[in-house]
Image (cartoon, grey):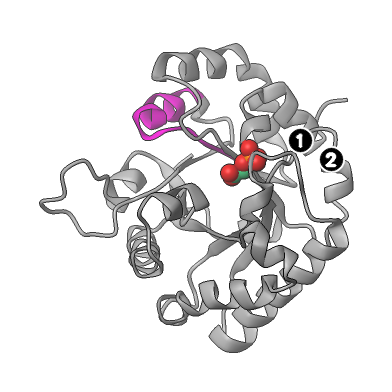
Amino acid sequence: MSGLFFCSFMSKPLFAANWKMYRSYAQTIEQCKKDLDLLRRLGANATIDVALLPSTDALSAVGQIVAATGIYLGAQDCSAHDLGAYTGQVAAQSLRELGCSFVIIGHSERRAASDTDEIIAQKVGQAFKAGLAPIICIGEPEAVYNLGQTQQFLTKQLQALQSILSAHTTHHFNIAYEPVWAIGSGKTPTPPEISNTISCIRNFLETEIGSSQFRILYGGSVNQKNAGELKNIEPFEGFLVGKASLDIQEFAHIINMIE
Ligand code: PGA
């Protein structure tokens, strides 16, 4: 879905499917076509926002398949730079032109590969400039969690974003709290732990940065078995789902759109 969508969407929970590089281009298209009726039903639910985030190669084709379904399109990363001599990179502006509304920035798999705090802040700036709502991932490694230092760790990650977010307080964005140790592991923190962490993130964004146009999602091993319990997170504003979103039927179970 393209066009102006920023009027009321932040008040609804967002369910974002991060398909990573699990499938090839052809496999992605086949899956979307096979489950198009279900995607239509998900997109037609006015009480939630649903976004598909396929790999970059499939954005255009997936965008065409879900056009007019109400499903949003998102990308998994963008360049930190304006258009220019950056071989192999994809500009935020191009993602917007392809119909994206969202872009993941700072996923732990990108942080592990090359993205520093500084690059992540630049990418967030590019997303804002292009009119995309970033889904900015933050999260602590297991050793930090075990030491009980999650909040200090996340505060540092947020401080690195302070200047770019302060300069764009009227722009919409999403924070995805994704503990690194929960991604793809089958392990998750408890809902009260997540609620506590989310409240610390919210407090930082509101009081240190002055932001108000944001949602805080949870991500990391969300599946159809634990989604009901994880929805007890207070307040519940959505999930960033990896592996379990590959099966659109399971994704719909997580959203609670099918029994
Ligand atoms: P997972 O991934 O749901 O497979 O744990 C989540 C993510 O990496 O965004």
Provide the residue designation for mark 1.
223
Q: Which residue is most to the bottom?
A: 207
Q: Amino acid at mark 2?
A: Asn
- Judged left or right of residue 174, residue 90 is left
**Range of residues picked out in magenta:** 50-65
- Look at 69% across and 74% down and name the residue there: 149
Q: Is mark 1 within 8 Å of ligand 1?
A: yes
Q: On the picture, is 243 further left or further right than 173?
A: right
Q: Which mark is residue 226?
A: 2
Residue drawn at x 10%, y 51% as measured from the top left: 85
- From the image, which quarter does the C terminus lie in? top right
- Cβ at disc 2 under 8 Å from ligand 1: no
Q: Position of residue 88 (x, y in %)?
A: 21, 41
Q: Is residue 54 magenta?
A: yes
Residue 156, quarter of picture:
bottom right
Crowd around label 2: few <14 · some 14–19 · many ≥20 (10 Å): few
Place residue 221 in its image quadrant. top right
Horizontally, is 258 left or right of 81 in the view?
right
Q: Decide: marks 2, 1 in contact (CB < 8 A)?
A: yes
Magenta residue check for 190: no
Question: Which quadrant of the figure has residue 117?
Answer: bottom left
- What amino acid does circle 1 point to? Asn
Mark 2 → mark 1, Cα distance in angstroms: 6 Å
Depicted 227 relative to depicted 247: above or below:
below
Q: Is residue 29 rendered to the left or right of residue 255?
A: left
